[in-house]
Image (cartoon, rainbow, N blue to C red):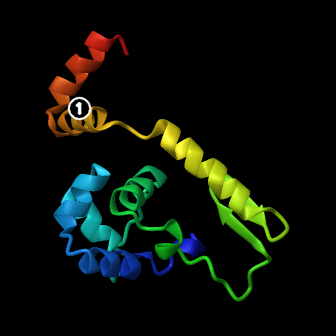
Amino acid sequence: MRYLQTFNRRLRQIREAGQLSCEDVAEMCGVDEARVVSWESMDVRQRAWPGVTELLDFCLKTETPLEDLLDLDDAGDTGQLELPGLAFSQGDDLSTALKELEQEISRIQLSEEEMELLRRFRKTSGENRRMILQILGK
């Protein structure tokens, strides 16, 4: 996870610059506040990292470029950006790949109504979630 070495400091800076609380970030990412606090922890033993979904939720909802949160500049870099599921070398046309990624994100981005339903689902009790999933046949 070399690209997350300074994530905790970068997240805190972006959060504070946007005048967001840990609770605000937690709500955006669908996690509890304690999880966000652990993302920002200065103590490596207590630090946790967000999943890809939470990371993308934060970036999309705060309009923060992903590269503002990740350590992409590495002196020993081999010329390849390594992220789970993505790999680009310096010879690849990164702008084309980013445009395709942007189109895919736009295609799967939830509507406001869908986001509200998801928020309500996440906030309900475990028992209610199980009943909803049973009704949906999952």
Q: Is residue 13 left or right of residue 100?
A: left
Residue at image position (36%, 74%) is 11
Q: Is residue 3 left or right of residue 110?
A: right
Report x, y in % for residue 38: 30, 69
Q: Among all residues in the image, which is located at the extreme right?
A: 91
Report x, y in % for residue 105: 52, 45
SS for callout 1:
helix
Q: Is residue 48 visible?
A: yes
Quadrant hosting residue 91 = bottom right
Q: Is residue 22 left or right of residue 13?
A: left
Quadrant hosting residue 23 = bottom left
Report x, y in % for residue 12: 31, 78
From the viewer's side, name the closer residue of 62 and 51.
62
| Amino acid, disc 1 | Leu
Residue at image position (61%, 50%) is 101
Is residue 26 depicted above or below 89 in this figure? above
Q: Is residue 41 visible?
A: no
For the image, the number of numbered tags is 1
From the viewer's side, name the closer residue of 2 and 107.
107
Quadrant hosting residue 45 = bottom left
Is residue 113 depicted above or below 91 in this figure? above
Report x, y in % for residue 26: 24, 58
From the viewer's side, name the closer residue of 49 and 101.
101
Residue at image position (28%, 38%) is 112
In the rendered image, the quadrant that contains the C terminus is top left
Is residue 27 depicted above or below 118 in this figure? below
Neighbor class of circle 1 (other Cα within 10 Å; few <14, some 14-19, many 20+) is few
In the rendered image, the quadrant that contains the N terminus is bottom right
In the picture of the structure, the residue carrying the numbered disc 1 is 117
Residue at image position (14%, 33%) is 125
